[in-house]
Each structure stands twice: as structure tokens, then as C-alpha cells.
Amino acid sequence: MFLTILHLVRSAYAQGLIPNPITATSFTALIDSITAQLVPIATVLAVVAIIFTGFKFLTAALSGNPGKLTESKKMFYYVLVGTAITVGAAVLANAVVKFVTELK
């Protein structure tokens, strides 16, 4: 069944029924496009995660449970590290694209 679906998709693509969603004409344009699409999504997810962690902090503080407070601190730390990795990856990708573009 999977092979049948794969064959249908391949033939539809070959006939031009499925357009190629990648409009980049070079590798640097592809990296720019991917970065431009992923950074806003990651930003929204980071904000939602920080707000959720804030609510976890509030509920842990109100309950007086030190275990939940420690868990909330750990979650907040993980959210910050994940956000830093995401921002760092975007900055690194932009730096690499700029460096490669200047080499040409």
C-alpha cells in the first residue's frame, strides 16, 4: 500500500500536479528561508513555555510544596536553555550565510 501511494505521489509530482514548495535557488537562500520560517514559530513557543512555567511557579509557591517548586525551577531552566539554543542556532545560521555570501 505504501509503495502504491509513493508511486501516485511520484507520478503526480512528475506531471506537475504537485508544485515544489522550495523556491530557493541557492543553499544560502534555503538557509535564510528556513531560518525565517522557524524563528517566529520558536519565539511563540518560547513565550508560551515561559508563561506556562510562570503558572507552575505560582501554583508551586501557593501550595508550599518544595518538590513542585524545584520542578518549576528546573522547567524554567530548560525553557531558557532551549530558547538560548534556538536563538544561537539562528544567529549561527545567519553568520554562516553572511560568511559564505562574502566569499563569492
Image: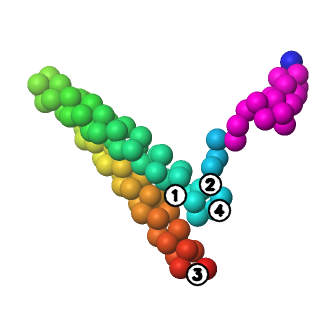
Q: Quadrant of the C terminus?
A: bottom right
- Looking at the magenta stretch, what is its main secondary structure? helix
Q: Which mark is residue 26?
A: 4
- Residue 37 in the image: x percent, y percent? 48, 46
**Marks 4 and 1, how far apart in space?**
10 Å
Q: Is residue 19 magenta?
A: yes
Q: Provide the secondary structure element on which disc 3 rests.
A: helix
Per the image, the residue denoted by label 1 is 32
Left or right of 68? Residue 63 is left
* Viewer-nearest of discs 3 and 2: 2
Q: Residues within 10 Å of mark 2 (few under 14, many from 20)?
A: few
- Read off the magenta span: 3-20
Q: Amino acid at mark 2?
A: Ala
Q: Provide the secondary structure element on which disc 1 rests.
A: helix
Dot 4 or dot 1: first in sequence order is: 4
Q: Amino acid at mark 3?
A: Leu
- The answer to whether marks 3 and 1 mark residues whose Cβ atoms lie closer than 8 Å is no
**Marks 3 and 2, how far apart in space?**
19 Å
Per the image, the residue denoted by label 2 is 24
Per the image, the residue denoted by label 3 is 103
- The answer to whether marks 4 and 2 mark residues whose Cβ atoms lie closer than 8 Å is yes
Left or right of 101? Residue 22 is right
Dot 3 or dot 4: first in sequence order is: 4
